[in-house]
Amino acid sequence: MSASTGELKQWMSALHLTEAAQILEESLMDAQTKDWSCGQFLHHILRHELQRREEKQRLKRLKWAAFPFIKSLDEFRLEEQQSLTKRQMEQLREMLWLEHTYNLILLGPPGVGKTHLSVGLGLEALERGYRVSFVSMGNLVHLMKTQEIARTSQTRMKRILRSDLVIIDDLMFMAMDKSESNLFFQFVNQLYGQASIILTSNKGPEDWGELLGDPAITTAILDRILHKSEVIKLDGDSFRLKHRETIFGDF
């Protein structure tokens, strides 16, 4: 008993093989003209199904990561950042630090590539199947304070807390009051041992007390972040100023 193409497509859709169902007719024609075996035909449509599922998952992870821009590690101007060697960059790309839930603290003045480096590492992790979330410190404070009353904030916080890598940008952007510092401690404590954190800041951990205010909370946060961490100090002139565009250039 042979089934029609329409029935086959219905059965495949019922089995959630929707991507394979879309190429069924084309694949059947290829199988006839190229004299495929049954095994070759199955390999072809199932490989397509798997590849399309993986691509959809990658796009979903990319959307949920909420990167402010897309810049890869290959685009990072390593030759202009003398404080980071090529060997160190390769070690970061290997992602062993992420496998062992190490944190990275990227320090340096504005414009030296901290955010670019964090996004590049986040993209590298995402391509390897890790769940990544990017959030600025200002937005994180807003999410923490509104998650109990705003569904969008609650959903975003759940995704961040389920991530394998959380990137927090511009830690010293704004000072916190005691209640905000306590919320940040609870946030860090939830991630501790479960996910890696990348922090970017223009000031070192010794100065974070200015931001967090409460000495006890500051100590508790530092204890969890620095327990397993690598501090990377970037220096030099601002990339943005060095490579700025001008309206008076040649058109």
Image (cartoon, rainbow, N blue to C red):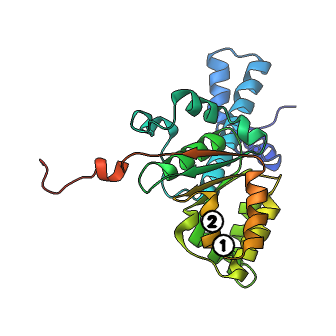
Q: Is residue 20 above or below residue 142?
A: above
* Discs 1, 2 touching: Cβ within 8 Å: yes
In the image, residue 42 above or below residue 56 = above
* Residue at x 75%, y 25% (from the top left corner): 43
> Is residue 154 visible in this depiction of the protein?
no
Which residue in the protein does label 1 denote? 212
**Is disc 1 placed on a helix, strand or loop?**
helix
Q: Which residue is mark 2?
A: 208
Q: Residue at point 56% right, 33% down? A: 89
Q: Amino acid at mark 1?
A: Leu
Q: Amino acid at mark 2?
A: Trp
Q: Secondary structure beneath disc 2?
A: loop
- The crowd level at tag 2 (other Cα within 10 Å; few <14, some 14-19, many 20+) is some
Q: Residue 225 sits in which quadrant?
A: bottom right
- Which quarter of the figure is the N terminus placed in? top right
Q: Nearer the viewer, residue 202 or 53?
A: 202
Question: As drawn, is 188 to the left or to the right of 115?
Answer: right
Q: Position of residue 249 (x, y in %)?
A: 14, 50
Q: Position of residue 103 (x, y in %)?
A: 70, 48
Q: Nearer the viewer, residue 193 or 26?
A: 193
| Badge 1: residue crowd in 10 Å (few <14, some 14–19, many ≥20) | many
Q: Would residue 76 be visible to someone looking at this image? A: yes
Q: Which residue occupies the extreme bottom position in the image?
A: 149
Q: Residue at x 51, y 38 (%)?
A: 73
